[in-house]
Image (cartoon, rainbow, N blue to C red):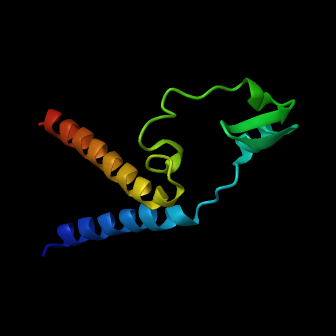
Amino acid sequence: MTRRSVFWFAFAAAVLVIAGGLSYLASGSPDGLDSATLQGCAVVETAAGEELSGACIAQHASEHLLASSPLADYAIGGHAATGGIAGIVGALVTLAVAGVAFWGIARSKR
């Protein structure tokens, strides 16, 4: 095996471990922006889902266009236990797109 292939195998393994393994260690708590927009409101669970009571900026927010996409909320189909798989899929898609872009750039310079 050449040094180049060893590097790429090690790189791929590191990407998969980071994207898949560390995804389960990520916090499920709101980040700074979510936390700031929720100040002054309380999140109430209802039969229809979560609703906000009180007065806060988040009450004026609406769902984004990709909220129903397969990898929305860093999970597959909204299942919280699939965060690692969603991380791996996202990393593989990113690597594929970057690989195709770099391959196209390299070919255009020839």
**Residue 52 image offset from top left, x and y in percent:** 78, 35
Q: Residue at x 73, y 46 (%)?
A: 32
Along the line of sight, the residue nearer the viewer: 26 or 63:
63
Q: Quarter of the image holding residue 73?
A: top right
Q: Is residue 78 left or right of residue 106?
A: right
State the image quarter where residue 10 is shown. bottom left
In the displayed structure, 14 sits above or below 97; it is: below
Residue reaching furthest front?
A: 47
Residue 19 drawn at (x, y percent): 43, 60
User: In the drawing, does residue 57 fall left or right of residue 47?
Assistant: right
Question: In the picture provided, is 66 more to the left or to the right than 29?
Answer: left
Choose top left, top right, bottom left or bottom right for residue 63.
top right
Front residue of 58 and 106: 58
**Extreme-bottom residue of the structure:** 1
Q: Residue at x 44, y 44 (%)?
A: 71
Residue 41 point in image, percent of width and height: 84, 37
Horizontal side of 70 relative to 2 (left or right) equals right
Residue 88 drawn at (x, y percent)? 38, 57
At a point 29% along the width and 42% down the height, the residue shown is 97
Q: Quadrant of the C terminus?
A: top left
